[in-house]
């Protein structure tokens, strides 16, 4: 039944009807969906496509590049560079912003993206994704670094694609967060999840628990209280999930609530977090806020962080609003010395190393 279905192009044209450059934004986002379909086709082929495995090279983050990282990066660039819609592009896979070939007309927008997020999951056939953020140039001329280094609040659009059992596209142009499912037979993204809303409360959290000893005390306190469940301060049981693919963890939160944390840790003191501000935390932050959730570093709203470099990392906590507010409160209490001293459960009185101390 094709009648009455809203394709992503129709949806964008309707949402962005008005000024001329809004039509250009719709056109750019349609170009992004073309790249996403190409990446979906490559990821879906799995081992049969010959795309699995590493290239033996490293990106600017020092991460081993997978063949699919590089191919996905090329798909995004080729799909978006030619149409006179972008002034420039930057990617997780490129040290510096992409040098747009001279023959292409310049447009008003900057596209920043992570072409294949969670790509360590590719070889084990677990969901991965593409994340993108769109900024508008505020002046004429070739973009300089400062044009990219703008807080997330200035994004005019953001989205991600998830390559899972179904390929979905989730996007926002600042008027709510909406989900589309790829109909593979006809090659169109169809609006299937309009106006996604994240419940304010949740009993589910996602974090890589193997880093627990490196977390700051407010995060240790939050997680310990969740794990204490019914018998602890929170008075109810919590559930954990960790896919190690940010888009997949975020998608679950958009579908049924929950929170996701990749906090600051001391594992590598040179890194103030794992996730990248411009093409991971900011676009996902905008999507989450537009769905009624919250996105924070623990100490600051993510969308208000002033970027200092293209590949900057930040601590990330996002999802159900009331839990993010609680985490922010725990950070404030810790920073001002007002929290009750946190004692690891290992050292509580009934534990193995118990000495009668109670938290
Ligand atoms: O881009 C970073 C990323 O792959 C995210 O998608 C994911 O949430 C995280 O890293 C997983 O990190 P770790 O391997 O430490 O669990």
Image (cartoon, rainbow, N blue to C red):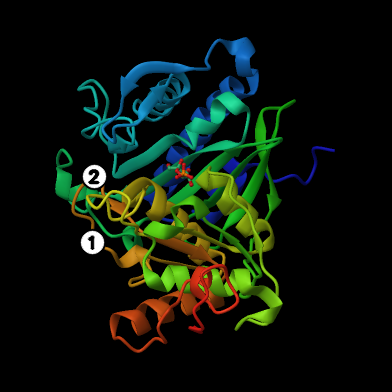
Query: Gap in Å between the C-alphas at discs 2 and 1?
Result: 11 Å
**Ligand 1 within 8 angstroms of badge 1 C-beta:** no
Which sits in the foreground, 96 or 81?
96
Most extreme residue toward the right, as rendered?
1
Q: Write the residue at 34% across / 28% down.
A: 81
Against 146, residue 331 (above or below) is below
Q: Residue 319 at what x, y percent from top left?
A: 54, 65
- Identify the residue at the far bottom of this view: 338
- x and y percent of residue 159 in the render? 49, 48
Q: Position of residue 199 (x, y in %)?
A: 65, 71
Between 99 and 82, the residue placed more toward the observer is 99
Asked if labels 1 and 2 touch by Cβ distance under 8 angstroms, the answer is no
The mark total stands at 2
Q: Quarter-wise, where is residue 103 in the image?
A: top left
Could you tell whether 122 is left or right of 54 in the image?
A: right
Q: Is residue 250 visible?
A: yes
150 up-or-down from 324: above or below: above
The answer, for residue 293, to whether it is visible in the render is: no
Residue 301 left/right relative to 312: right
Q: Which label number is shown at residue 310?
A: 2
What is the number of the mark on residue 320?
Answer: none
Q: Could you say which is closer to the camera, residue 319 or residue 84?
A: 319
Q: Residue at x 49, y 66 (%)?
A: 289
Q: Position of residue 284 (x, y in %)?
A: 46, 54
Answer with left or right where residue 244 lies relative to residue 312: right
Image quarter in which the N terminus is found: top right
| Residue at 36% across, 66% down | 216
The crowding category of the residue bearing disc 2, from other C-alpha atoms within 10 Å (few below 14, some 14 to 19, many at least 20), is many
In the image shown, does 306 or 53 lie closer to the viewer? 53
To which residue does mark 1 refer? 306
Quarter holding residue 85: top left
């Amino acid at each position: 039944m094709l009648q009455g279905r809203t394709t992503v192009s129709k949806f964008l044209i309707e949402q962005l009807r008005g000024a001329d450059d809004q039509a250009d934004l719709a056109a750019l986002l349609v170009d992004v969906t073309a790249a996403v379909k190409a990446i979906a086709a490559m990821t879906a082929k799995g081992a049969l496509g010959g795309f699995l495995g590493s290239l033996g090279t490293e990106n600017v983050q020092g991460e081993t590049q997978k063949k699919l990282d590089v191919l996905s990066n090329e798909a995004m660039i080729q799909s978006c560079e030619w149409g006179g819609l972008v002034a420039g592009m930057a990617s997780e896979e490129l040290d510096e912003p992409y040098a747009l070939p001279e023959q292409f007309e310049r447009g008003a927008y900057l596209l920043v993206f992570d072409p294949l997020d969670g790509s360590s999951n590719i070889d084990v056939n677990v969901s991965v994704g593409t994340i993108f953020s769109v900024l508008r140039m505020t002046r004429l001329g070739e973009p300089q670094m400062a044009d990219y280094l703008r807080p997330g609040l200035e994004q005019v659009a953001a989205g991600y694609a998830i390559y899972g059992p179904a390929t979905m596209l989730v996007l926002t142009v600042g008027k709510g967060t909406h989900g589309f499912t790829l109909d593979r037979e006809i090659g169109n993204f169809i609006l299937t999840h309009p106006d996604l809303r994240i419940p304010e409360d949740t009993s589910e959290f996602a974090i890589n628990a193997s880093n627990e000893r490196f977390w700051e005390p407010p995060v240790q306190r939050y997680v310990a209280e969740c794990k204490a469940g019914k018998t602890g301060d929170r008075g109810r049981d919590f559930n954990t999930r960790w896919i190690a693919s940010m888009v997949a963890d975020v998608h679950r939160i958009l579908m049924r609530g929950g929170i996701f944390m990749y906090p600051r840790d001391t594992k590598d003191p040179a890194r103030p977090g794992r996730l990248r501000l411009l093409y991971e935390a900011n676009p996902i932050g905008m999507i989450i806020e537009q769905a009624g959730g919250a996105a924070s570093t623990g100490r600051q709203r993510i969308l208000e962080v002033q970027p200092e470099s293209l590949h900057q990392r930040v601590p990330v906590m996002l999802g159900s609003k009331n839990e993010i507010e609680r985490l922010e409160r725990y950070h404030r209490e810790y920073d001002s010395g007002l929290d009750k001293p946190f004692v690891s459960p290992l050292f509580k009185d009934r534990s193995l190393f118990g000495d009668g101390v109670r938290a």
